[in-house]
């Protein structure tokens, strides 16, 4: 059975249909970045809400700034914008069809996207454009010198970037006398609302400082923390859906059962009542965000590189390896969790126990390679802030130094067995050259100021890093981990 509106009333028994009449939906949110995480997260929360008979004037309209997104749009269009979501736990799997998207503007068609944002029914513009999509420099500040930003600043009437298009949409609304939409970032970056605001106002400042000031004064950017492990879709997932559930979907989404969304309540034009669907609205999302970034995302980094060097393919296989799992737990308990401030009504130890179970889920099919991806962007966000806090407080940092050495060793492009590691970072060629130089002179790795800043000058950390990297090359990952776990 091929997924479409026509089969919703006769889906296989194991697949749940949307619990509402889709003809009752009307758009309220335009979303940039219609990928797996968005559909497993924001689209699924809205689907829950619509099934309760709530918020049905907040349906999703998709958007994308790259022509390459046209293929995804065509797949979803052939399915009437429907997505099959498969939630997988160790002992169960549940499939349901999400109906919360009702349209998808042609990707890279700036005039059409701008016009859609300028329509009165769009009251929220949301984004999942990945951590690397915010034009940040090595200090995590907006980079006005980026070529794409300079191009949009020179021709603001013909934008190519997501921020240029959003600015054009806001200009059109202001000219029409419409209040600005709220901009809701759903990307996994610290202070994501503030980062989005800085990018938008930073771009506007280059061509129209008065408009930049208007955006800063009038547009809301609530911060949020989002969480759901959602691997990429491959033929494996399509085959499972077809063979085990009896449904053909060109782009299904597989994810874990767990999901979390914590958000600040700042929506001047209103919002869907997402608290009824499980979203937690709080005055300040920062404590939750820091907990997640350090314990979960830092934990992903901790298991990624040792597992990658030992030729382990799936995340759950890594968690089944006693050295990888042991490294994760020791690092979390002794160096990561001690550097996470208290979170309201939350036990950090229980939170890590939950994460350990989530990482061990054998049905997710999440890959070690995905966790290793884009370390040049992720390490400065998920590992190095914890390291800096540990150094400032005089706390232990041996395991964090080892994690940095494991990343350096991975970037050399070959596993302990001699297998080649395919490029896995936007800066892979540069990283590989530095990592290979660091085999003979480990400090070459820490001298990457864009990543490590002044950390190379810290003798204790630099000494531990160099010792670990030398040992990884001379003895291999297993022996180094065994020694670390033995104290």
Image (tube, grey):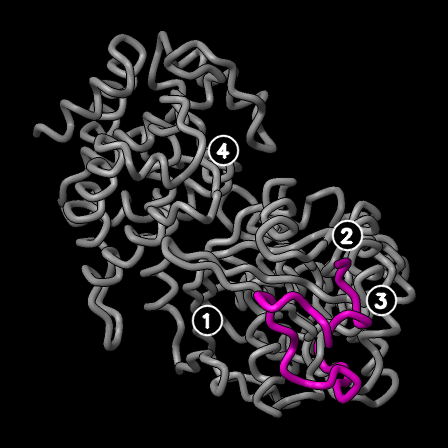
Residue indicated by mark 3: 113
- Is residue 185 left or right of 101 when viewed as pictured? left
Q: CA gap, disc 4 to disc 2?
A: 23 Å
| Picture residue at 60% right of the left edge, 57% below the top | 245
Query: Which region of the structure is painted magenta?
Result: 1-29
Q: Of callouts 4 and 2, which one flags the residue occurring earlier in the amino acid sequence? A: 2
Going from N to C along the chain, the mark reached first, 1 or 4, is 1
Which mark lies nearer to you, 3 or 1?
A: 1
Of labels 2 and 3, earlier in sequence is: 2
Asked whether disc 2 touches disc 1, contact meaning CB atoms under 8 Å apart, the reply is no
| Residue at numbered disc 2 | 72
Q: Nearer the viewer, mark 4 or mark 3?
A: 4
Q: Is residue 408 left or right of residue 274?
A: left
Q: What residue would you read off at disc 4?
A: 369
Query: Which quadrant holds the C terminus?
Result: top left
Secondary element at tag 2: helix
Residue at 83% x, 90% y: name it.
177
């Amino acid at each position: 059975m091929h997924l479409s509106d026509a089969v919703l009333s006769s889906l296989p028994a194991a697949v749940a249909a949307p619990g509402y009449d889709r003809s009752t939906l009307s758009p309220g949110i335009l979303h940039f970045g219609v990928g797996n995480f968005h559909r497993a997260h924001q689209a699924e929360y809205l689907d829950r809400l619509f099934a309760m008979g709530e918020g049905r004037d907040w349906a999703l309209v998709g958007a994308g700034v790259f022509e390459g997104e046209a293929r995804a749009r065509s797949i979803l269009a052939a399915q009437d914008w429907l997505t099959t979501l498969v939630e997988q736990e160790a002992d169960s799997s549940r499939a349901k069809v999400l109906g919360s998207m009702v349209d998808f503007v042609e990707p890279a068609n700036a005039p059409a996207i701008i016009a859609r944002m300028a329509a009165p029914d769009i009251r929220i513009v949301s984004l999942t454009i990945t951590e690397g999509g915010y034009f940040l420099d090595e200090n995590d500040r907006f980079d006005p010198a980026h070529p794409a930003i300079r191009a949009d600043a020179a021709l603001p009437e013909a934008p190519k970037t997501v921020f240029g298009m959003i600015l054009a949409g806001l200009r059109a609304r202001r000219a029409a006398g419409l209040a600005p939409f709220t901009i809701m970032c759903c990307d996994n970056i610290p202070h994501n609302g503030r980062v989005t605001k800085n990018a938008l106002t930073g771009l506007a400042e280059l061509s129209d400082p008065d408009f930049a000031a208007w955006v800063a004064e009038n547009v809301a950017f609530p911060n949020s923390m989002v969480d759901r492990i959602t691997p990429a879709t491959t033929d494996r997932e399509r085959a499972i859906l077809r063979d085990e559930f009896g449904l053909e979907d060109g782009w299904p989404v597989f994810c874990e059962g767990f999901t979390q969304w914590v958000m600040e309540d700042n929506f001047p034009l209103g919002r869907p009542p997402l608290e009824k669907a499980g979203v937690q609205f709080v005055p300040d999302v920062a404590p939750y965000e820091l907990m997640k970034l350090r314990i979960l995302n830092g934990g992903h980094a901790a298991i990624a590189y040792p597992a990658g060097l030992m030729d382990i393919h799936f995340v759950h296989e890594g968690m089944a390896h006693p050295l990888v799992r042991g490294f994760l737990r020791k690092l979390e308990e002794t160096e990561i969790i001690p550097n996470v401030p208290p979170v309201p009504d939350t036990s950090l130890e229980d939170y890590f126990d939950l994460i350990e179970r989530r990482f061990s889920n054998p049905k997710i099919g999440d890959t070690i390679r995905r966790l290793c991806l884009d370390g040049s962007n992720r390490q400065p966000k998920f590992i190095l802030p914890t390291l800096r806090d540990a150094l400032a407080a005089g706390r232990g940092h041996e395991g964090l130094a080892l994690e940095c050495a494991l990343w350096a060793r991975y970037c050399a492009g070959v596993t302990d067995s001699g297998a080649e590691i395919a490029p896995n970072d936007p800066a892979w060629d540069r990283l590989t050259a530095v990592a290979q130089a660091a085999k003979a002179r480990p400090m070459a790795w820490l001298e990457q100021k864009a990543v490590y800043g002044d950390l190379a000058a810290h003798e204790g950390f630099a000494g531990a890093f160099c010792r670990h990297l030398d040992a990884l090359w001379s003895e291999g990952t297993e022996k180094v981990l065994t020694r670390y776990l033995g104290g």
